[in-house]
Image (tube, rainbow, N blue to C red):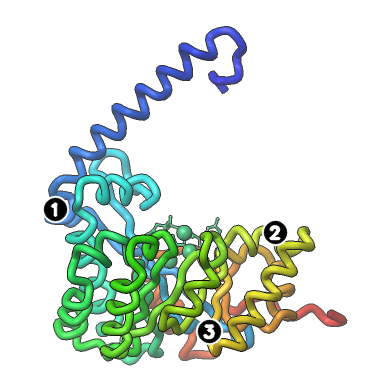
């Protein structure tokens, strides 16, 4: 609004920047002790089977309940944690919490699902990730097959040999590995060749354009074919419309994640969804339209 008003443009824009810088500074200070004060929480977003709408996995997504600003999204504060070297510690908390939560759900007799945890580059290279994962599994008693670790391409730019070695140690423990935001980086195909992956997650930017853009549809078609040939599972991220789902179903994409089925939600809502899976009262994806 302000920025579009011809004359004062420059001044207003600078003051916007100043405000952003101040906010950044304030939030950085507030982040100290946020973990100890219990201000972090995990929300979970279902990964769903296209064929029968059953939940197969839950991605843990970090949220910060700021005492005065309310709920803050990770895009805003994870870079701050990284900058201040705090992501290793918070990442350990995420791992522990997600594993304890999944073990608790299983202990309640709810249907077994994977829990997927995002890893940052700092955690991977400086945080003794193998130890952190083993501790989280030991403490929670969760069987490793129910934990999946999501890695992104930006993570792996540093040192391929170290990356492969760490990934192999994690695989040897029995946890699953998936490559997040697939297709957005420069060397996606190289990673498929070198890394011991179980799954790829097709980035939301492809799903967004899949219905209207011919090249995007062709790329997704190829990714799914490649995944099949390489024996990798595939989840399409960011599915928001029935049309996108229909397209992915036709392409034999087995699993989706996105607002169409559910946004990331709090623990209590996940428990409702898991309980519904046990009864006839299932939440379902839109069904295949007749004639298509
Ligand atoms: P991501 O791992 O790719 O997670 C998926 C993001 O897409 C989530 O954003 C989710 O809310 C959003 N999303 C899911 N379905 C839809 C959809 O249908 N439409 C749209 N527009 N968005 C959708 P969120 O929770 O804001 O997280 C953003 C990123 O922050 C994550 O991207 C991940 O890279 C990072 N992140 C979140 N939690 C953690 C964590 O515990 N540790 C680390 N290292 N990174 C995390
Ligand atoms: Mg992810
Ligand atoms: Mg992603
Ligand atoms: Mg992302």
Q: How crowded is mark 1: few (under 14 residues within 10 Å), some or many (20 or more)?
A: few
| Labels 1 & 3 near each other (Cβ < 8 A) | no
Residue shown at 22% from the left, 72% from the top: 129
Q: Name the residue under label 2.
A: 209
Question: Which of 290 and 169 lies nearest the eye of the viewer?
Answer: 169
Q: How many marks?
A: 3
Question: Which of 22 and 46 lies nearest the eye of the viewer?
Answer: 22
- Quarter of the picture containing the C terminus is bottom right
Residue shown at 83% from the left, 82% from the top: 290
Q: Quadrant of residue 18?
A: top left
- Whole-number angstrom distance, CA of label 2 to CA of label 3: 22 Å
Q: Position of residue 248 (x, y in %)?
A: 69, 75
| Label 3 element class | strand
Q: In which quarter of the image is residue 88?
A: bottom left
Q: Does the residue labelled 2 lie within 8 Å of ligand 1?
A: no
| Label 2 element class | helix
Q: Mark 1 points at which residue?
A: 37
Q: How crowded is mark 2: few (under 14 residues within 10 Å), some or many (20 or more)?
A: some
Q: Where is residue 147 in the image (x, y as percent from the top left)?
A: 33, 82
Q: In the drawing, what numbered circle is on residue 233?
A: 3
Say above or below: 26 vs 236: above
- Whole-number angstrom distance, CA of label 1 to CA of label 2: 41 Å
The answer to which of marks 2 and 3 sits earlier in the sequence is 2
User: Quarter containing ligand 2?
Assistant: bottom left
Q: Position of residue 148 (x, y in %)?
A: 37, 79
The answer to which of marks 1 and 2 sits earlier in the sequence is 1
Residue shown at 25% from the left, 83% from the top: 104
| Label 1 element class | loop
């Amino acid at each position: 609004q302000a920025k579009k008003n011809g004359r004062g443009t420059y001044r207003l824009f600078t003051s916007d920047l100043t405000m952003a810088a101040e906010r950044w500074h304030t939030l950085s200070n507030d982040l100290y002790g946020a973990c100890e004060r219990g201000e972090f929480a995990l929300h979970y977003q279902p990964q769903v089977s296209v064929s029968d709408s059953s939940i197969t996995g839950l991605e843990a997504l970090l949220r910060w309940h700021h005492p005065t600003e309310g709920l803050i999204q990770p895009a805003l504060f994870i870079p701050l944690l990284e900058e201040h070297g705090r992501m290793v510690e918070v990442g350990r908390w995420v791992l522990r919490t997600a594993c304890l939560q999944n073990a608790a759900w299983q202990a309640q007799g709810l249907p077994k699902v994977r829990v997927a945890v995002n890893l940052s580059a700092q955690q991977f290279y400086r945080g003794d990730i193998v130890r952190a994962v083993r501790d989280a599994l030991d403490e929670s008693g969760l069987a490793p097959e129910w934990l999946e670790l999501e890695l992104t391409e930006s993570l792996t730019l540093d040192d391929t040999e170290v990356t492969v070695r760490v990934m192999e140690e994690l695989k040897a423990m029995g946890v699953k590995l998936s490559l997040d935001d697939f297709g957005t980086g420069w060397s996606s195909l190289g990673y498929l060749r070198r890394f011991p992956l179980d799954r790829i997650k097709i980035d939301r930017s492809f799903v967004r354009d899949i219905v209207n853009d011919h090249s995007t549809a062709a790329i997704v078609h190829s990714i799914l074919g490649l995944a099949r040939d390489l024996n990798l599972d595939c989840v399409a991220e960011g599915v928001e419309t029935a049309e996108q789902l229909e397209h992915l179903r036709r392409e034999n994409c087995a699993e989706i994640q996105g607002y169409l089925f559910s946004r990331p939600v709090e623990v209590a809502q996940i428990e409702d969804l898991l309980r519904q899976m046990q009864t006839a009262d299932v939440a379902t994806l839109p069904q295949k339209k007749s004639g298509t």
